[in-house]
Image (cartoon, helix red, strand yellow):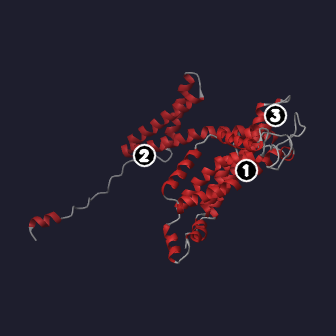
Amino acid sequence: MSTSTQSTLQVAPEPSGPVPRRSRLPRFAPLGLYAAGIAVGALLSALTGFSVALTVIYGAVLGTLAVYVGSRVVEGSRKASDRLVTALVTTAFAIAMIPLVSLVYTVLEKGLARFDAAFFTNSMFRVVGEGGGAYHAIFGTLVITAVTAVISVPIGLLTAIYLVEYGTGRLKKAITFFVDVMTGIPSIVAGLFAFALFTLLFGNDVRLGLMGSAALSVLMIPVVVRSCEEVLKLVPNELREASYALGVPKWRTIVKVVLPTAVAGLGTGITLAVARVIGETAPLLITVGLITGTNLNPFDGRMATLPVFAYYQLTQPGTDTQAFLDRAWTAALVLIILVMVLNVVARLISRFFAPKTGR
């Protein structure tokens, strides 16, 4: 081997001393710098007439700037850029949480005034002032939502199965296009559609719980289709191919292999779709109306629902205004609790029915 080749293959010697490490900020220093920026922002806001909005803006800007400058001086530009992005994301999250926390706090503060047994056991029949409750509206909401689910879930699930397993060509593209269009339909349009349909069939004076379910189905079906379609796409094709290799028909493969594999995602998507429509107000104002008594038959007459109950209690108070407002806030609190319960159920379904991949 030539001398030039030997010199080319020589390895650079290891450094004799320890590798120098760049300094790092103490663990809680970024939080302290950000808090200092907020304090300075509050001071600037106080000098120009204190405002919560200005304090938030000044504090976010100055706090982020303080974290970036402090990190750049001590840790260098690369770590400073990382802390800058972290501060921006954290600030955006905190700002987004402000209205949510404010909303929950306000509803709890005002809604707990009538969160008692009477609210859940009494209706508004012959009540013109204090007292009464939303028993009729709570059960009306549950009945109408259940009928909506009975209509929407089979249609949405079968449509998703067709799009994923069978659909090809123009028909699949047309269905996908119309589902996308239906996803963006305003809720009032869904209510007008159901009202026009039932008016043509039964006359101008008809108001039924079934009308409300039909209107909510227009809003729920595209959500079910979209969620179920995405879940079915996640089922590995290897499972289908293994079933086909054993001579199992396609329909049986879907029923016995695809759907059981995707049951957790399907249940989660359907539950979230129910939570999406349970609080709709505009379609129910047009189609269902409001009564003060209890009617649990969706095929006979008007029904009370929580969103409409809260709307009328707020916009049409009687002689005792405060009693009406208290009932409206409590109805809003119950709606939030129902939506929260549905979201928790969705999480539980996703957790307990997910395919077991561990060995």
Residue bearing the label numbered 1: 145
Which mark lies nearer to you, 2 or 1? 1
Q: Can residue 76 be seen in this view?
A: no
The front one of 329 and 94 is 329
N-terminal-most mark, 2 or 1: 2
Q: In which quarter of the image is residue 104?
A: top right
Which element is circle 2 on?
Answer: helix
Mark identifier at residue 82: 2
x, y percentage for residue 103? 67, 38
Which element is circle 3 on?
Answer: helix
Three-letter amino acid code of the residue under disc 3: Phe
Look at the image and tell me in which quarter the C terminus lies: bottom right
Three-letter amino acid code of the residue under disc 2: Asp
N-terminal-most mark, 1 or 3: 1
User: Residue at the left extreme?
Assistant: 2
x, y percentage for residue 306? 76, 43
Which mark lies nearer to you, 1 or 3? 1
Residue bearing the label numbered 3: 324
Q: Are the residues tagged 3 and 2 within 8 Å (C-beta)?
A: no
N-terminal-most mark, 3 or 2: 2
Q: Is residue 359 above or below residue 271?
A: below
x, y percentage for residue 305? 77, 43
Number of residues whose C-alpha sits closer than 10 Å to that of mark 1, classed few (under 14), some (14–19) or many (20 or more): many
